[in-house]
C-alpha cells in the first residue's frame, strides 16, 4: 500500500505582496488587512510561489538555519495552518 | 492616452502633480460646482482620462447615498450609488460621472467619485493618496501626519498652523514616489480644516508620523521599512476595489518612500509641546546632519 500523498500548498493568486528588506508585506485580497512576515516566514512564503509540501518547506528552512527538518516541521505546519485560515494560501493537487 | 470622446464643454484638468483628470460638462450647475470647489487645481493641460460630468436623473433606486459599490474590473472603474453612477475606462481614457444635482449635497457626491478615481490614477503613476495631514514647517520641511479617523490629524494641523506652519491638507495628501526624492503634494481634498491657501504645492517629505494621542509627548525610533510600509498601507483609502496589480504598485510606491523617509510613531498631547518633537524650527539639512 503506497503512503498517502502529502498535501501541497501555494500562494493564493490574488494576494498582493512584496519582499522588503528580507521581510514580506502581504495584503489580504478580501479584507485588505496587511501582514508583515519575518525572515523565516518570508522564506516560506516565497517558496510558496510554487506548490510545496510542509516537508519540502521544512527541509528548506532547516537547511538555512542548520536544523533538522523534523525540528522545524511543526512550526511550518502551524504557519501553513495560519496562512490557510486567512485564505492567503490554497491547497493544490 | 486621451482620445477625447467627450462631447461636453471642457471645464479643465484637475491636477495633483502627475495625476491629471480632465473634466468636461455641458451642465452649467456641474461646471459651477467643479470650478468653485477645485478652481485652484484646474489647469489647461491635457488630462487622462477625460471624464464627462452629467446630471443623474432621479431613479427608482433606494438606499444610502453614502454607500458606494466600487469595482475595478479589466481596467474599468465603476462606482454606483443612488446618487452617483461613474464609469471610467482606464485603458481608453474615457468615462462619465453622472451625479445627483442636489444643490446641498452634489459636491460631496462628486468628490467621493473624484477621490476614488484619483486614487486609482495615482497608484498607476507611482503615487498614493494617503489619509494624512501635510504641513510645511517655517523652514520649508514637509511633514506628514497619518492615522485613523480621530487620531488627531486636524488637531495637530491646527497646532502647527498657529505655530507658523502651512497646512496643505488635514485629511488627504498625495505621496509622490515618482520623483527621485519623495514629494508631499497638496490636494483639493481636505477635512475640517480648510487650507488658507489651497493652491497646488509640493515639498520633499522630511518625515512621516503615525499619530497617537497621548498625555505625554514622545516620539519613537523609526520603524523598520517593512513595518513602515505596512503601517502606511492601513491609511491608504479607497483601496477596496483594487486588484492585485494595483495593490502591488501601492506597496512598491511606499517601499520607495520609506527607503528615503523615516517613519516614526508620534505620541502627542493636543498642545504646543509637540513642536519640540518635530525639530520645528530646523531646516532639512540640519535634521539630516
Image (cartoon, grey):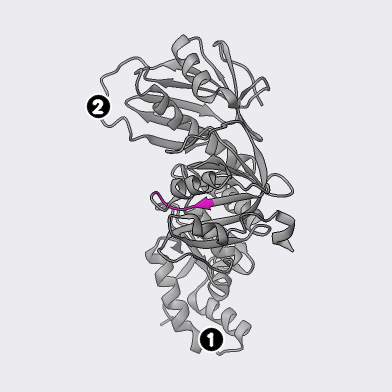
Quick check: marks 1 and 2 in contact, CB under 8 Å? no
Classify mark 1: residues with Cα within 10 Å, few (<14), some (14-19) or many (20+): many
Q: Residue at 31%, 30% (x, y): give it.
A: B65
Between B151 and B92, the one lying in front of the other is B151
Residue B193 in the image: state x and y as whole percent: 46, 38
Visible in this render: residue A49? no
Residue B146 counted in the magenta span: yes
Residue B237 pos. (x, y %): 47, 45
Left or right of A5, for residue B130: right
* Image mark 2: chain: B
Q: Find residue B198 and report its image quarter.
A: top right
Is residue A83 at least partly visible in the picture? yes
Question: Label 1 to label 2, Cα distance in Å?
Answer: 59 Å
Instruction: Pick whichever, B159 or B257, lies toward us.
Output: B159
Secondary structure beneath label 2: loop
Seen at 47% across and 9% down, the residue is: B28
Q: Which mark is residue B62?
A: 2
- Magenta highlight range: B145-149
Residue B241 marker: none
Q: Residue at x 46, y 16 (%)?
A: B30
Residue A82 lies in the magenta stretch: no
- Above or below, B191 against B88 in this view is below
Image quadrant for the N terminus of chain A? bottom left
Along the line of sight, the residue nearer the viewer: A51 or B247? B247
Which quarter of the figure has residue A61? bottom right
The local secondary structure at tag 1 comes to helix
Q: Say whether residue B255 is left or right of residue B25.
A: right
- Identify the main secondary structure in magenta: loop
**Residue for badge 1:** A69
Amino acid at each position: 500500500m503506497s503512503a498517502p500523498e502529502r498535501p501541497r500548498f501555494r500562494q493564493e493568486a490574488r494576494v498582493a505582496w512584496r519582499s522588503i528588506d528580507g521581510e514580506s508585506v502581504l495584503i489580504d485580497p478580501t479584507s485588505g488587512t496587511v501582514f508583515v512576515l519575518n525572515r523565516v516566514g518570508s522564506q516560506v512564503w516565497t517558496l510558496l510561489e510554487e506548490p510545496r509540501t510542509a516537508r519540502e518547506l521544512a527541509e528548506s528552512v532547516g537547511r538555512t538555519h542548520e536544523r533538522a527538518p523534523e525540528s522545524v516541521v511543526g512550526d511550518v505546519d502551524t504557519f501553513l495552518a495560519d496562512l490557510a485560515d486567512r485564505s492567503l494560501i490554497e491547497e493544490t493537487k | 492616452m486621451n482620445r477625447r470622446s467627450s462631447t461636453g464643454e471642457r471645464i479643465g484638468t484637475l491636477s495633483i502633480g502627475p495625476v491629471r483628470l480632465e473634466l468636461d460638462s455641458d451642465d452649467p450647475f456641474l461646471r459651477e460646482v467643479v470650478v468653485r470647489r477645485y478652481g485652484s487645481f484646474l489647469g489647461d493641460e491635457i488630462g487622462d482620462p477625460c471624464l464627462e460630468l452629467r446630471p443623474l436623473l432621479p431613479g427608482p433606486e433606494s438606499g444610502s447615498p453614502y454607500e458606494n459599490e466600487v469595482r475595478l474590473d479589466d481596467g474599468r472603474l465603476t462606482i454606483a450609488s443612488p446618487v452617483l453612477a461613474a464609469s471610467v475606462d482606464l485603458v481608453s481614457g474615457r468615462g462619465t460621472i453622472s451625479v445627483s444635482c442636489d444643490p446641498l449635497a452634489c459636491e460631496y457626491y462628486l468628490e467621493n467619485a473624484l477621490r476614488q478615481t484619483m486614487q486609482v490614477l495615482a497608484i498607476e503613476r507611482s503615487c498614493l493618496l494617503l489619509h494624512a495631514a501635510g504641513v510645511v514647517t517655517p523652514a520649508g520641511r514637509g511633514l506628514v501626519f497619518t492615522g485613523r479617523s480621530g487620531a488627531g490629524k486636524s488637531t495637530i494641523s491646527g497646532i502647527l498652523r498657529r505655530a507658523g506652519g502651512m497646512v496643505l491638507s488635514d485629511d488627504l495628501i498625495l505621496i509622490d514616489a515618482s520623483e527621485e526624492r519623495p514629494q508631499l503634494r497638496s490636494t483639493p481634498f481636505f477635512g475640517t480644516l480648510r487650507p488658507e491657501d489651497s493652491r497646488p504645492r509640493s515639498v520633499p517629505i522630511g518625515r512621516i508620523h503615525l499619530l497617537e494621542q497621548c498625555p505625554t509627548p514622545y516620539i519613537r525610533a523609526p520603524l523598520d521599512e517593512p513595518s513602515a510600509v505596512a503601517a502606511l498601507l492601513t491609511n491608504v483609502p479607497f483601496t477596496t476595489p483594487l486588484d492585485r496589480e494595483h495593490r502591488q504598485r501601492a506597496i512598491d510606491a511606499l517601499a520607495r518612500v520609506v527607503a528615503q523617509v523615516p517613519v516614526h510613531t508620534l505620541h502627542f498631547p493636543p498642545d504646543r509641546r509637540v513642536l519640540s518633537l518635530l525639530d520645528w524650527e530646523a531646516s532639512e539639512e540640519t535634521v539630516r546632519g
